[in-house]
């Protein structure tokens, strides 16, 4: 698969335009590199970029809205390509218990862990799930996320999974952000199916996924391939069912052990394999051949105090695109800042700042199948971009915590707080 995007700027002036944005350095992220255009201009029409290049070459559009920046940088809007933002309750009490010395076993025995989130999610109304997800989405959006993926996977029953997916679709109508929905019914074994994982997998394949496809509730199907979740053979059944319905697949793989789920995903042409701490050289080769993006999730690695780092050197060597995401979830990654993940991707996994930024822009978009419409500054792409009063793109990765001022443009319009 080629990673080559169209040329960063065209010489043909567009027929009409709505707005012109000029005076900042454009960090285009073409082909995963900064590919800077100093003192650049972006021309927008109908929510898309129709021209960009140096200000000196910019055609005049006297009737268009004019936006002048006194320096700074413009990056593509951030893509958070892996989140579990919809769930009932939260697990802060469990977090506190653990730090007070209560063991995982004791917490699980008292109904804690993922099952507590499943119970709270099943009990919540759609409106309650929407409100709590908005509370977590807003901070992500405030620092520049213009496209977010959200998974189901805490319902684990037909009705509750469909409820989660409807909530995800509704969120797209509540905030000015692009939302991609992923069905992750194969996240964990529901208590009702204890010791009967194959029956649960059949329920997903034969009953749930056909409804999801018919009602257009998901853009992709995901699963969790791990000893404590589902085997590669079970995952493969889910993949086959999804593909028969025309839904692309992705996979949580190699987080805690090596089952070669990432190679399996790649053989099925998966959009991405995610986590990957225990991925091997062979897995990376398979992913390169399958065009599968490696989604790295430093938040969970950090919170679980993992020691095994994902094999970034293999991914580099085999040219597997690497994305970074928040993995926002109540148990292992209560992360509300994608920019913090940029820093952690570098400090914990050894990414370069340029690779980290590519991970939340062009490669994040590719992990969602959106590489033709999102993730770089280029003609034809969505006019989703962020102006930062910073001198260099590495500053986005370097500043740790805090809130950097920024102007977020979504589909060609400034996204104000009233949109959030
Ligand atoms: Zn996840």
Image: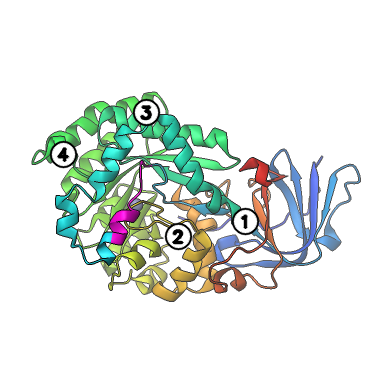
- Chain-order first, disc 3 or disc 4: 4
- Chain-order first, disc 2 or disc 3: 3
Q: Which mark is residue 323?
A: 2
Q: Secondary structure at mark 1?
A: strand
Residue at the disc numbered 4 = 191
Residue at the disc numbered 1 = 76
Q: Are marks 1 and 2 in contact (CB under 8 Å)?
A: no
Q: Which of the two marks, 3 or 4, is nearer to us in this view?
A: 4
Q: Quadrant of residue 11?
A: bottom right
Q: Quadrant of residue 348?
A: bottom left
Crowding near pointer 3: few (<14 within 10 Å), some, many (20+)? Answer: some
Residue at the disc numbered 3 = 213
- Front in this rendered view, residue 71 or 362: 71
Distance from Cα at disc 3 to Cα at disc 4: 25 Å
Instruction: Say if residue 217 shows up in the picture.
Output: no
- Residue drawn at x 49%, y 55% is 364
- Chain-order first, disc 2 or disc 4: 4
- Front in this rendered view, residue 69 or 379: 69
> Where is the N terminus found, in terms of image quarters?
bottom left
């Amino acid at each position: 698969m080629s990673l080559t995007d169209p040329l960063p700027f065209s010489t043909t002036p567009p027929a009409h335009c709505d707005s012109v944005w000029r005076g900042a350095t454009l960090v285009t992220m073409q082909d995963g590199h900064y590919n800077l255009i100093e003192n650049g201009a972006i021309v927008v029409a109908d929510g898309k970029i129709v021209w960009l290049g140096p200000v000196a070459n910019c055609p005049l559009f006297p009737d268009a809205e004019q936006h002048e920046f006194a320096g700074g940088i413009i990056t593509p809007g951030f893509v958070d390509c892996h989140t579990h933002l919809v769930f009932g309750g939260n697990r802060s009490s469990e977090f506190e218990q653990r730090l007070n010395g209560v063991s995982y076993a004791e917490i699980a025995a008292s109904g804690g862990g993922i099952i507590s989130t499943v119970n709270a999610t099943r009990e919540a109304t759609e409106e309650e799930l929407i409100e709590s997800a908005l509370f977590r989405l807003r901070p992500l959006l405030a620092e520049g996320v213009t496209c977010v993926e959200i998974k189901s996977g805490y319902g684990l029953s037909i009705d509750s999974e469909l409820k989660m997916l409807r909530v995800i679709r509704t969120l797209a109508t509540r905030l000015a952000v692009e939302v991609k929905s992923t069905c992750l019914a194969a996240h964990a074994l529901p208590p009702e199916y204890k010791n009967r994982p194959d029956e649960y997998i059949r329920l997903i394949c034969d009953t749930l996924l056909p409804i999801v496809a018919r009602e257009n509730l998901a853009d992709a199907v995901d699963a969790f391939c791990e000893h404590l979740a589902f085997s590669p053979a079970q995952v493969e059944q889910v993949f086959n069912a999804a593909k028969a319905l025309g839904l692309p697949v992705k996979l949580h793989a190699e987080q805690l052990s090596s089952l070669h789920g990432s190679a399996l995903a790649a053989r099925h042409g998966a959009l991405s394999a995610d986590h990957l701490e225990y991925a091997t050289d062979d897995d990376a080769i398979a992913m390169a051949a399958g065009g599968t993006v490696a989604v790295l999730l430093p938040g969970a690695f950090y919170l679980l105090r993992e020691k095994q780092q994902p094999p970034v050197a293999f991914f580099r060597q085999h040219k597997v695109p690497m994305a970074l995401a928040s993995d926002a979830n109540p148990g292992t990654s209560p992360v509300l800042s994608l920019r913090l993940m940029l820093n952690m991707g570098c400090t914990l996994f050894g990414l370069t700042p340029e690779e980290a930024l590519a991970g939340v822009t062009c490669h994040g978009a590719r992990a969602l199948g959106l590489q033709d419409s999102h993730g770089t500054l280029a003609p034809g792409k969505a006019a989703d971009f962020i102006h930062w009063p910073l001198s260099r793109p590495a500053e986005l990765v370097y500043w740790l915590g805090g809130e950097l001022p920024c102007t977020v443009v979504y589909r060609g319009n400034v996204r104000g707080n009233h949109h959030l």
